[in-house]
Amino acid sequence: MAWLRDVKTYHHPALREVPLHSVMQALSDPCRMAIVHELLQAKGRKLAGNEIRLSISKATRSHHFEVLRAAGLIFTEMDGTKCMTSLRRAELNQRFPGLLKLLGTGERR
């Protein structure tokens, strides 16, 4: 089962260690806000990266997902060959009450 060694894993910080300014900095980019809005509209459903509509290269897309992960906003896990991503809703609501509701009221550009 050599393939098990090659399964990509992602680092997800403990949200208690993530300061608000790191979250806000991650959300300052329009592409990252678009990702968060798509995940908000998914209402808890996990999305594959290619399900999120962005007109950017794969490398740039990966970078934006990494920034959101490092800020504690998203959770990514492998499902076969797909990277499935969801918002860390419960943790975010506990750590930063009202943040997701506020983000959900903004218009996507």
Image (cartoon, helix red, strand yellow):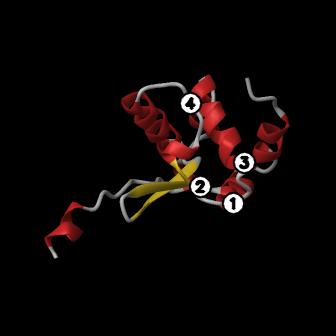
- Residue type at the position of mark 1: Gly
Element class at badge 4: loop
Element class at badge 1: loop
Element class at badge 2: strand
State the residue position of label 1: 44
Residue 58: give x, y in percent of width and height: 40, 33
Residue 59: give x, y in percent of width and height: 36, 31
Q: Earlier in the sequence, mark 4 or mark 3?
A: 3
Label annotation for residue 34:
none
Label annotation for residue 40:
3
Q: Earlier in the sequence, mark 2 or mark 4?
A: 4
Q: Quick check: 106 left or right of 109?
A: right
Q: Residue at x 70, y 53 (%)?
A: 42
Of residue 67 and residue 45, the one placed in the foreground of this image is 45
Q: Earlier in the sequence, mark 2 or mark 1?
A: 1
Q: CA distance from mark 2 to mark 4?
A: 16 Å
- Residue type at the position of mark 3: Leu
- Residue type at the position of mark 2: Ser
> Are dots 2 and 1 in contact, CB under 8 Å?
yes
Query: In the rendered view, would you say 106 is above or below 65?
Result: above
State which mark lies toward you, 2 or 4: 4
- Residue type at the position of mark 4: Leu
Q: CA distance from mark 1 to mark 3?
A: 7 Å
Quarter of the figure that contains the C terminus: top right
Query: In the rendered view, would you say 12 is above or below 54?
Result: below
Label 1 CA crowd tier, 10 Å (few <14, some 14–19, many 20+): few
State the residue position of label 4: 54
State the residue position of label 2: 86
